Image (tube, helix red, strand yellow):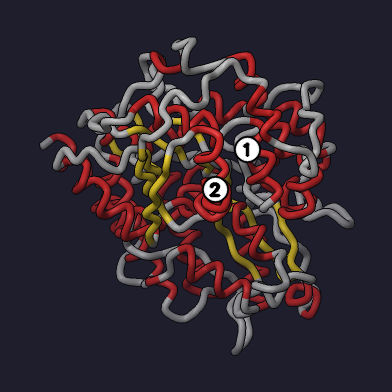
Amino acid sequence: MAQGENSLSHPASRRSFIKGLGAAGAGLTALPRWSFAQDTAAAYANAAIDWKQFAGQTIALSGANHPWSNAITPLLPEFTILTGINVTIDFQLETTFLGALPVKLARGSSTPDVFMFTTYGQGISNGWVEPLNGYYSMRSLTDLAWYDESDLLKTARAFPLWSDGERYAVPITSEAMTLFINRDALAAKDQPVPQTFDELLVTAKAVKTNGMSGIAMRAQASGNSSPPAMGFLFSYGGAMVEHNRVAFASPEGIAAVEMYGQVLGQAGPAGVGSYEWYHVLDDFLQGRTAMAIDSSNFATDISNPVKSRVAKQAGFATFPHLAGRGPVPFMSHWQACINSKSRNKRAAFLFLLWATSKATSLRTAAAGLATTRVSAWSSEGFKKAFGPQAAEAALTNLQDADVDRAKAVLFHPQSRLILDAFMIGVNEVVNGAKSAKDAMTGAAERANAAIRG
């Protein structure tokens, strides 16, 4: 696909940002009219909800160190003033949190009351997470007209639905794998922004120097590192799970992982086999890599000159694609769940309504958080904090993504096992220990055997 003269995106992303929002969610006629300078309490007063009905209760909120936790934490005192509900927080390094949470839930702990979550199938099948449809229907608790679910991005409306139509989570962020570009590094080697995987390999090799890798991506042998590699897999036409069986050892899956291994093996940083998302982000922020592929939510840090040495030369592009096929980046919505053993479930649900409402989302979006709200995505505060080009690339990648393929693995009861097996295989390929065929075939066989067992 030809490169646009001044574009970092493929032609589909050249639609206007607002038009793209309309395709991804609802129309923009109902945007909130209050400004940040006005008393935001008025926005909550418009809800037919008794905000003080659980005053005096305390809920425990747990999650990962993440843009959402960074954006919501400063607003928690306002929630307490509004509701009388106190919130204690426990945010940890993502890998630490994701490893410890299932152990705590399996023991039947009543806390945390609310937690960020990714392994939905495991949580639902084990009865760890509270079904939420009934809470949405409680008139004393929820004002659906005020909450306005039509303002949610299309992917956010579809993502939390289980096969029986029940909801066990509330989406809190929107993210898709995005290509980050150091424009100066590419210009120094007279390289265009790559659009296909073949071009990505050529460009990454061309711009690699002794002091800068061509590209950085996650490759650690852990399921938490799987999102970028899954984008390669989906874009090659593969799937993680089909008919309750692991499917990543298909010809498409093997070809995708082989390309992933070639790109990182020939142009990645030293020690890339141990890379998690924070290694990728730090390399790009410090100018140690010319390109990176990871979460669109990195844009806030990348564009912040206080944190980023490359803020002025950073570019944001759509996910690469296989020649002749459209890109299918991995996308997800971090979601928040209520502990089924919580003693404060209604207070916890009230917190989730508040945290994901239009009014609160406008506030967190102004801090650069990619929320689930159309109104927040289109706000000037978000576009200023996130960057208009980054926002357009992220939205396009969300539109190009396949929600069902992402949910097939994330909602599988053995999702952690499957993701770990996949990344062990990817890691073997990146490190040159095995061919893509041997690594993925072995990983799939082990995972399927464990699922049947």
Residue 43 horizontal side relative to residue 442, left or right: right
Other-residue count near label 2 (Cα within 10 Å), few / some / many at <14 / 14–19 / ≥20: some
Q: Amino acid at mark 1?
A: Thr
Q: Position of residue 243 (x, y in %)?
A: 31, 26
Residue 250 can be seen, yes or no: no
Q: Amino acid at mark 2?
A: Ile
Residue at the image position 49 percent from the left and 10 percent from the top: 139
Q: Which residue is mark 2?
A: 72
Q: Position of residue 31 (x, y in %)?
A: 78, 27
Residue closer to the observer: 30 or 270 = 30
Q: Position of residue 169 (x, y in %)?
A: 41, 30
- Residue 202, quarter of picture: bottom right
**Do residues under tags 2 and 1 come within 8 Å of each other at their CB atoms?**
yes
Q: Does residue 349 sit above or below 314 in this rendering? A: above
Mark 1: which secondary structure?
helix
Other-residue count near label 1 (Cα within 10 Å), few / some / many at <14 / 14–19 / ≥20: many
- Residue 49, quarter of picture: top right
Residue 61 horizontal side relative to residue 357, left or right: left
Instruction: Say which label, 2 or 1, has the lower sequence index.
Output: 2
Residue 395 horizontal side relative to residue 93, left or right: right
Quarter in which the C terminus is drawn: top left
Extreme left residue here? Answer: 453
Residue at the image position 38 percent from the left and 17 percent from the top: 166
Alpha-carbon span between mark 2 and mark 1: 9 Å
Residue at the image position 54 percent from the left and 39 percent from the top: 81
Q: Does residue 51 sit above or below 91 in this rendering? A: above
Q: Which residue is mark 1?
A: 360
